[in-house]
Amino acid sequence: MYRKLVLTLSDFKLKFDQKLCETCPTYDCLVRCQYMNLDKEVAKIEMQKMVRGENSFVLYRCVTCYACEEYCKRGNHPFYLISDLQEKNSILPMPKPLITQWINTGIPTKKDIREFWGAVEPVISLCLFPEYINSIEGKLFEGFSIVVGRYFFCQLAYLHFGRPSIIRERLSSIIENIANHGFQEIVFFHDECYSTFTSYTQAYGIQVPFRSVHLFEYLYGRLRELEDEISPLNVKVAYQRPCSSRLAPEKEHFVDDIFNLIGVERVEREYDRENSLCCGGIIRGQQRYDLFVDVQRRNVVDMVNAEAEYCVFNCPMCFASLSEAVVKRDIKPIMMHELCRLALGEVIKS
Amino acid sequence: MDRVCERLARIVGENYVSNMKEELYIYSQDPGMMEPREPDYVVMPKTTVEVQKIVKLANEEKIPVIPVGGSLSLSGLVIPHKGGIVLDLKRMDKIIEVNERCRYVVIEAGVTTGRLKAYLEKHYPRLRFSIPDAPPSATVVGNIVIHGQGHLSQQYGFNSDMVTGLEVVLPTGEICKIGSCSVSPYWFSLAPLPDIAGLFLGWFGTTGIITKLGLRLYPRKKLRDIEVFIVEDPHLVPDVVYRVTHTEMAEDIFVNAQPYPPIFKDIIMMGICITGDSEEELEFKRRMIWNVLRTYIDSKEGGFMMTTPDVKRALLEMPITGTTRFADVMKGGGFEYCGPIIPVEKYPEAYKKLLELSSEYGVTYGNTCRVIGRGHCMMFAFGYPFNRADPDNMERTKKALHESNVASLDIGGVPWKPEVPAQKMIMARMDKNTLELMKRIKRFLDPNGIMNPGNWEG
């Protein structure tokens, strides 16, 4: 019983309310941008240009950190608009070969498994991060089936490359594949996947026939079940918030909930929560080297000044981008689920 | 045991000579395409004097002698095409001297690249040599004899340009020292004497057997890093190389293209290694390289790849083991490449030809290039893994290799460590007087024609 879910590009219609923008009292989407120093007047002019579908310097200077999606408290979608306009105006946030490379990376190969027929719920999708398979073990993940690979790759990364049409071209087969496994509910290891099947699809009016579970929500629930076995870690941590968490800010409280449960102190620092800085990976990919160096330096110095012992990551790409820099300052990089496993007394394989 | 075997045993001891079928088999082939041929004897000398005695015996018996290191040329250079004695030098594995201040090492012919690397890391952590991307069982001398290249070749040229002295057993049995070591206890350089080292480099053992080697060592910086610049258009590669070499900031520059995995499809990667004793030094070099490529970045034609620590680690390996893994991508135990030395400006033509041949013969490919000198030339590998259990695949690969050699010469390049048929192609195009000079040199040094016959025979 194989269901076909055929979506065409025209099925994707961004729910963007022009009037909300026109009447916005703050233009926080651009005023609060950490990478463009815009006052409210300029922000208003540029935003209105974009609302009309016109060109704007914002489209060239955007680092694609997704933060404006969170800064907009009126439920509009400024970043999705920016991304759509970048493609419409053929503005390349990165050099062409990097875009080609990433587009090719998402195309399934003969080695990719489409059908994990043995997989039963509870199930977790590791997206394109097979290197984490061995870390999905222990009490937190007892009984879990794992699915992984390009047939489960959410494609949302193409927002960074100014190519949202790639997402739309490929998303229906990804949704279809997950649904055809019969999963009612799936935990997403990467919150970019979670945000795709919640925020992005909702913004474009696409129905998703399964329930997406954010990893942190799952971890918190499971840790509550295992509360008696938790040994508080008593360490100070900095949390590196990833871009895709901006698309699901309603799940951010689970970070504090988990930290409280496992006995770690989230250090107070300048670049945290809504004021978080990008890990720098995409900024480097945009070839803005000076900005990349500056952003990483400010971020890490902020962690050092706050006396963080660990830098806790949500996203494997952030981990790859920032871990070397934090290690150089004697801060230990660790993924959130691994930190939780430490609190349960489990040994993490390097 | 036959008579020759007995005589060899008297030189090296019974344990180090064999004419047993199972041992001869090992020396009959390499992982490449050349037809296997068993030797008649295998002998493993321990000293130069033993090598000398074996060569004298071979002259008396008029038996071919094939000096062997790691047997990793892939182009059949030590397959005994006319039988004879394989002279395996692996027991001559002493690291004789490291002169730290003059930065050179003197080693015996059987010392492997892996052993020298480990030795220097342990005892002389401030020194290094130009490690080739061959398996660590390749011998340093073997690599020198074929004009190999390594991770320092962009800075200092072919690995054979780093020779400071040689000890050679001539085909007639004399032991000869070349370079400063011929008049001094020091092995610091070939100059200022007449340079006769060239009589033994690139000749594949047809003019004598190198038993000791003096080799330049270089400063080993504490830190290494890599930037990977990628483009889609092969025509940009020569200029990118020109710009980066102009900065003199790079240690190694390699150029890779391959269809698998998908992240490498349709792009050309240029790995630019940098070294430094401090983060500041690294950062300075990194910025110089970024700045010099800014116009390509601004035009969106090229950019620095987003590399994860894992990818960096893999690319910074010495040797890069990914090369070896790719060699068996067809899971048939076969790999050979035609790796001509070409002018860097000819990269686009060579790349285009590689894609054409891969498509025409239905073979997969891997392309690895290494810049030699400050863009003076580059090694361009038309690399083809193949399945030995699939005769059709082997035949198509053989044709692709042949065509690659022809194309290399057509574009003005010269096949590197060419197999015998490619040697003949080179000689067919060679200046006639040069060819005659080569023949005269060979006749003069090896009057009985016993040294690795089949190679460089016009």
Image (cartoon, helix red, strand yellow):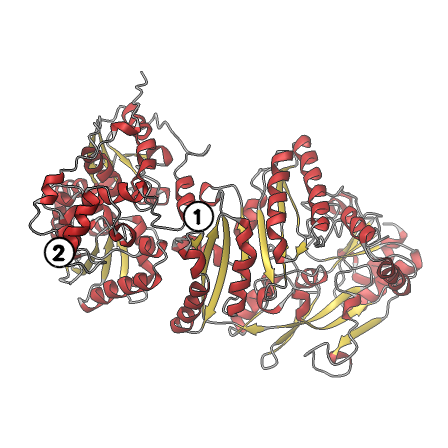
Find numbered disc 2 in the image and state the secondary structure of the residue it sits on: helix
What is the three-letter code of the residue carrying label 2?
Answer: Glu
Q: Is residue B98 above or below residue B404?
A: below
Work out whether disc 1 and disc 2 sit on a shared chain: yes
At x 70%, y 46%, the residue is B407
At x 71%, y 38%, the residue is B399
Q: Is residue B90 above or below residue A341?
A: below
Query: Which residue bears the numbered disc 1?
Result: A97
- For mark 1, name the chain: A
Query: Which residue bears the numbered disc 2?
Result: A41
Judge the density around disc 1: few (<14), some (14-19), many (≥20) Cα neighbours within 10 Å: many
The answer to whether B194 appears left or right of A141 in the picture is: right
Residue furthest out toward the bottom: B184
The numbered dot on residue B223 is none
Q: Earlier in the sequence, mark 1 or mark 2?
A: 2
Question: Is any part of residue A190 visible from this angle?
Answer: no
What is the three-letter code of the residue carrying label 1?
Answer: Pro
The location of residue B202, given as percent across then percent down, is: 75, 61
The answer to whether B259 appears left or right of A194 in the picture is: right
